[in-house]
């Protein structure tokens, strides 16, 4: 079993902090809202950072960083969206999106670790897969929560339609995540090393 080293703790801590910032950036900077269809959608960077965690840290360390983030939130610290903490955000209709971050980082990292070349096409494709995981798990969880324990019956299609503004925003940020990784590859030669240490 691989021992954790200082570098593992450092990168894990970094992405935990980024997830906290990404969840609440619109609270600290209210102007960071995106007008879509006549509504203002607050900017959230959690999906963006979860995808980057998988790309940069690899499947194991990336997923571990997301698990640590969730566990910190479950202790009651206000690290989830809206500066919330505790169990409620996890069992609320949007709890599936939080849970999906672990799967995003793991699957994105797993796919890239099995690629010999990190081309722009590969990075964009993997980033989109991460987004699909995020919304498939998140919307499905929302649908079940609304219909089962909240007793507010909605159709699965309605659940998806309600998330369209957020999906549009996160689709743009997903492409930005892939572009960010492309830029990092050109400027930071140690990126593959970071991925190797997480295996």
Image: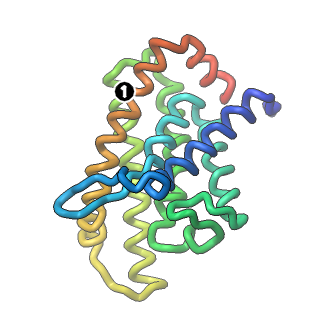
**What's the coloring here?**
rainbow
Q: Which sits in the foreground, 140 or 161?
A: 161
Let me know if residue 19 appears in the view: yes
Q: Would residue 52 appear left or right of 59 to someone viewing this image?
A: left
Which residue in the protein does label 1 denote? 179
Residue 56 in picture, x, y percent from top left: 55, 28
Q: Would residue 47 appear left or right of 60 to someone viewing this image?
A: left
Q: Would residue 21 appear left or right of 85 to someone viewing this image?
A: left
Q: Which sits in the foreground, 34 or 149?
A: 34
Tag count in the figure?
1
Q: Secondary structure at mark 1?
A: helix
Vertical placement of residue 167 versus 162, above or below: above
Q: Quadrant of residue 118?
A: top left
Residue 140 in picture, x, y percent from top left: 39, 66
Residue drawn at x 21%, y 56% is: 36
Let me know if residue 102 appears in the view: no
- The quarter of the image holding the C terminus is top right
Vertical placement of residue 7 versus 24, above or below: above
Residue 183 in picture, x, y percent from top left: 42, 19
Residue 60 in picture, x, y percent from top left: 64, 37
Residue drawn at x 57%, y 17% is: 192
Residue drawn at x 62%, y 66% is: 85
Vertical placement of residue 13 versus 72, above or below: above
Vertical placement of residue 131 versus 180, above or below: below
Residue drawn at x 39%, y 36% is: 127
Q: Quadrant of residue 193?
A: top right
Q: Which sits in the foreground, 94 or 154?
A: 94
| Name of the residue lying farthest toward the left | 37
- The quarter of the image holding the N terminus is top right
Within 10 Å of disc 1 (Cα), the crowding (few <14, some 14-19, many 20+) is some
| Name of the residue lying farthest toward the bottom | 151
């Amino acid at each position: 079993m691989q021992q954790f080293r200082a570098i593992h703790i450092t990168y894990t801590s970094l992405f935990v902090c980024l997830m906290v910032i990404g969840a609440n950036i619109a609270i600290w900077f209210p102007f960071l809202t995106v007008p879509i269809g006549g509504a203002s959608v607050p900017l959230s960077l959690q999906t963006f950072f979860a995808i980057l965690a998988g790309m940069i840290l690899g499947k194991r360390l990336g997923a571990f960083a997301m698990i640590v983030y969730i566990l910190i939130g479950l202790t009651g610290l206000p690290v989830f969206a809206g500066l919330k903490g505790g169990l409620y955000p996890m069992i609320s209709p949007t709890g599936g999106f939080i849970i999906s971050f672990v799967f995003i980082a793991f699957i994105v990292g797993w796919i890239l670790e099995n690629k010999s070349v990190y081309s722009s096409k590969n990075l964009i494709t993997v980033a989109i897969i991460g987004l699909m995981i995020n919304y498939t798990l998140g919307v499905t969880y929302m649908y079940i929560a609304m219909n089962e324990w909240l007793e507010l019956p909605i159709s699965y299609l309605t659940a998806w339609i309600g998330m369209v503004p957020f999906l549009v925003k996160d689709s743009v940020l997903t492409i930005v995540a892939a572009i960010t990784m492309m830029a990092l590859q050109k400027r930071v030669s140690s990126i593959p090393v970071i991925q190797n240490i997480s295996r």
